[in-house]
């Protein structure tokens, strides 16, 4: 059954999202709904619209069990309905990928052909000249945006999430034969809370904001 609350209020969603670590293991989310959720997440922006994000989705109990030791026994990886690992494809920064995406924009009537060609020409040499380190930093930015959007979309659908870096990335990559071109960004558990997350505090806006260059 769909849980999407199409009237979910944005302000409620951003205020009520909380990292949830205790999930109801009996709740299943259908593949169809996970695809809808990912479809909402990927409306996030990305640099030059290269869509570098990739997702590994774990829903089978036996395979989620494999995540448990890698995540230092954090039970949410088993009890949550799905664990979604956000990755970034280092091959996204190629003229072929730019062309593939922009051709779709041309076909949809959103982009004139000559703009696509101009972009292809300008990125042709540029991507090759950028270091792998910088490309990884781009991945973290785009991956962070899509991950946040995924968590908010899940909340709007009545699900809870927790973002996780507390897992052994090396072990994860080995276990699932993750190819070198894919970099790990964030693991996100998605499900229904068995117990609500803890309320959390934030530094105040005045503590984290500099106005007009005055640091
Ligand atoms: C990059 C990142 C990594 C995190 N890793 C973990 C984790 O491994 N395990 C966990 O329980 N929470 C993890 N968290 C959740 C944070 O502890 C949580 O977001 C923070 O305490 C604020 O609480 P809130 O999400 O409920 O607002 C992570 C959050 C972020 C953004």
Image: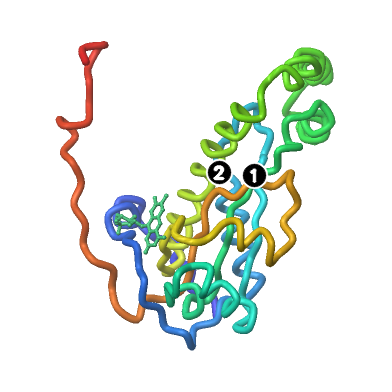
Residue at label 2? 143
Say whether marks 1 and 2 touch (CB < 8 Å).
yes
Q: Residue furthest bottom?
A: 26
Q: Is residue 143 left or right of residue 132?
A: left
Whichever of callouts 1 and 2 sits on the residue coming sooner in the sequence is 1
Q: Where on the picture, by quarter, is residue 65?
A: bottom right
Label ID, residue 200:
none
Image quarter in which the C terminus is found: top left
Q: Residue at x 75, y 24 (%)?
A: 111
Residue 208: image location, x then y, percent: 22, 31
Residue at label 1? 88
Residue 95: image location, x then y, percent: 81, 26
**Location of residue 154 with respect to 31 vertically, above or below:** above
Q: Nearer the viewer, residue 78 or 147?
A: 78
Residue 66 visible in the current orientation:
yes
Residue 6: image location, x then y, percent: 46, 62
**Location of residue 188 with respect to 59 vertically, above or below:** above
**Secondary structure beneath label 1:** strand
Q: Where on the picture, by quarter, is residue 9?
A: bottom left
Image quarter in which the N terminus is found: bottom right
Residue 108 visible in the current orientation:
no
Q: Residue at x 60, y 76 (%)?
A: 66
Q: Residue at x 57, y 53 (%)?
A: 40
- Give the mark count: 2
Q: Is residue 36 left or right of residue 118?
A: left
Q: Residue at x 22, y 17 (%)?
A: 211
Q: Quadrant of ligand 1?
A: bottom left
């Amino acid at each position: 059954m769909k849980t999407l609350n199409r009237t979910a209020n944005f302000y409620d969603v951003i205020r009520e999202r909380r990292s949830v670590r205790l999930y109801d293991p009996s709740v299943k989310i259908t593949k169809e709904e996970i695809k809808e959720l990912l479809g909402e997440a990927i409306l996030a922006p990305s640099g030059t619209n290269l869509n570098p994000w990739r997702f590994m989705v774990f829903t089978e109990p036996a395979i989620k069990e494999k995540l448990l030791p890698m995540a230092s026994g954090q039970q949410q990886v088993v009890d949550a309905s799905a664990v979604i690992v956000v990755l970034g494809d280092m091959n996204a920064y190629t003229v072929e990928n730019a062309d593939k995406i922009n051709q779709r924009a041309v076909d949809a009537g959103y982009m004139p052909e000559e703009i696509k060609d101009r972009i292809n020409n300008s990125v042709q040499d540029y991507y090759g000249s950028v270091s792998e380190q910088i490309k990884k930093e781009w991945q973290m930015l785009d991956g962070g945006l899509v991950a946040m959007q995924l968590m908010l979309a899940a909340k709007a659908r009545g699900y809870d999430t927790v973002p996780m870096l507390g897992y052994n990335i090396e072990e994860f990559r080995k276990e699932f034969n993750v190819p070198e071109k894919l970099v790990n960004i964030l693991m996100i558990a998605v499900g229904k809370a068995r117990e609500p997350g803890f309320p959390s505090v934030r530094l105040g806006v005045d503590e984290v904001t500099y106005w007009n260059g005055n640091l």
